[in-house]
Amino acid sequence: METQGLTKGIIKEWLDEVKDPEIPVLSLNDLGVITGIDIDSKGKVTVDMTPTFTGCPAMDVMKQDVLDVLEKRGVTDYDVNISFETQWNSNMISEKGRKALKDFGLAPPPQHDMIVDIDIIERASCPHCGSENTEMKTPFGPTLCRSMHYCHNCLQAFEQFKPL
């Protein structure tokens, strides 16, 4: 591929089409998993990804999806690294990502000041009715990154993307 004119912004835009395999309405960009994009002087593209959790089973799928997007766009010299150099936290989810989570029926994690105590973990706004009259039923959801809650106003159970 002719890499002249290729920018980090273009690659980031391409990566908007890569969705979280467990939450297919949320791009890896909006999830905050894409933590670095670089293009060296020879045109080699490097994409760094940080998992939301150590051992996230979706990382291999996400990595392959990033590779597929780069190859589809004609990039032939690339590296996609899974790295813990940048520690992921739920504040890295964009506002667009938070809205996508809510529209999908998952409560987005609250913003925090990097201190996640039990009060933050237990607190969730119902994604269905917006009520704060909710209760955490279990911190263990169907995936490592989700917890289960119940809304006393609309009487629906819901999941929250955990604050970290």
Image (cartoon, rainbow, N blue to C red):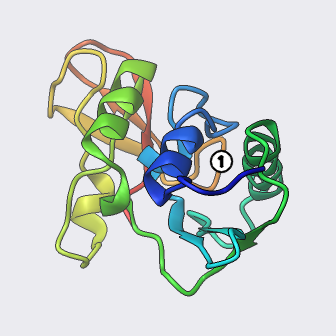
Q: Is residue 44 above or below residue 96?
A: below
Q: Is residue 102 above or below residue 27?
A: above
Q: Is residue 96 left or right of residue 153?
A: right
Which residue is more in the foreground, 43 or 29? 43
Q: Is residue 71 left or right of residue 45?
A: right
Q: Is residue 110 left or right of residue 164?
A: left
Which residue is more in the foreground, 47 or 85? 47
Give the quarter of the image for residue 40.
bottom right
Q: Is residue 146 visible?
A: no
Give the quarter of the image for residue 24.
top right
Say few, some or many: other residues with alpha carbon within 10 Å of mark 1 (under 14 / 14 to 19 / 20 or more).
few
Give the quarter of the image for residue 19.
top right
Residue 164, image x, y percentages: 39, 67
Q: Is residue 20 visible?
A: yes
Which residue is more in the foreground, 97 or 138? 97
Q: Amino acid at mark 1?
A: Thr
Residue 23, image x, y percentages: 59, 33
Which residue is more in the foreground, 6 or 90? 6
Q: Which residue is mark 1?
A: 143
For label 1, the SS is loop
Determine the residue positioned at 22% across, 35% down.
Answer: 125
Residue 53, image x, y percentages: 61, 67
Residue 78, image x, y percentages: 78, 65
Determine the residue positioned at 50% across, 49% down.
Answer: 12
Determine the residue positioned at 43% across, 28% down.
Answer: 158
Q: Is residue 132 above or below residue 86?
A: above
Q: Is residue 121 above or below residue 17?
A: below
Determine the residue positioned at 73% across, 41% down.
Answer: 69
